[in-house]
Image (cartoon, rainbow, N blue to C red):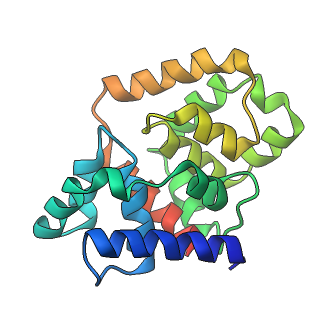
Amino acid sequence: MNQSRINVVSQIKWRVTGCVSSSINDLDCIALALAASFPHDQDEIFGVLLSNSVCNTALENANRLAITQAEWDVLFGKEGSFVSEEHAKLVVLDKDFEPYSVSIEAALRCSLTEQVAKKQWQRYTSRLSCYAALHTDVAEEWIGSVLGGIVKADTRRLDDVRSSIEDTDTDCMLLSRAVIALAQCVV
């Protein structure tokens, strides 16, 4: 693990264990911090990750638990390094993920002509990170961090994809699998 990632994982673990429970491992701390960043879906994802009693405590502290922009940049940004991409690959190659991947790629059609963004998009972790980012209130910033920037012409289309996700029932199992897979890629 590179030192920046180690520091961020430790920081998140300290915050999560202090707010929720000292028995939560690194992987679950990262997953919980990611899930806390989803204002519309956190309760369902917490329900998948945690027991009922711990879930209630996490919901009460969700704003404090949520991953910050700086933490996102280190863990999932363009310069992020991963232990492995295998867990992300399993989710990205799943048929349930394909429609999201296609719609995100179509929305980012101008950005993905840029060399850096195009290279980043080839990574399974980048695709999964972009999907997760769409469930936040800072989707554009987080996706820009993952890809190394977004062409302004794509922001409206990206917002449409985000709105479409918000307007339909979230596939909580897919989103939970994405959160867990991203956490596994980091720790």
> Does residue 6 lie above or below 68 as drawn?
below
Quarter-wise, where is residue 82 in the image?
bottom right
Quarter-wise, where is residue 80 in the image?
bottom right
The structure residue drawn at horizontal position 11% and vertical position 65%, both measured from the top left corner, is 52
The structure residue drawn at horizontal position 17% and vertical position 69%, both measured from the top left corner, is 54
The structure residue drawn at horizontal position 77% and vertical position 22%, both measured from the top left corner, is 110
Which quarter of the figure is the C terminus placed in?
A: bottom right
Number of numbered labels in the structure image:
0
Which quarter of the figure is the N terminus placed in?
A: bottom right
Place of residue 109 in the rendered image (x, y in percent of width and height, measured from the top left): 73, 24
Place of residue 50 in the rendered image (x, y in percent of width and height, measured from the top left): 23, 67
Would you say 171 lies left or right of 159 here?
Answer: left
Quarter-wise, where is residue 5 in the image?
bottom right
> Does residue 165 lie above or below 53 as drawn?
above
Place of residue 89 in the rendered image (x, y in percent of width and height, measured from the top left): 60, 60
Is residue 62 shown to the viewer in this render? yes
Would you say 129 lies left or right of 146 here?
Answer: left
Place of residue 170 in the rendered image (x, y in percent of width and height, measured from the top left): 31, 37
Would you say 122 lies left or right of 177 here?
Answer: right
Q: Pick the residue in front: 16 or 147.
A: 16
Would you say 41 lies left or right of 113 here?
Answer: left
Judged from this view, the residue extending furthest toward the right is 115
The structure residue drawn at horizontal position 32% and vertical position 42%, both measured from the top left corner, is 171
Is residue 93 shown to the viewer in this render? no
Q: Pick the residue in front: 151 or 126.
A: 151
Judged from this view, the residue extending furthest toward the bottom is 23
Q: Pick the residue in front: 164 or 35.
A: 35
> Does residue 63 lie above or below 46 as drawn?
above
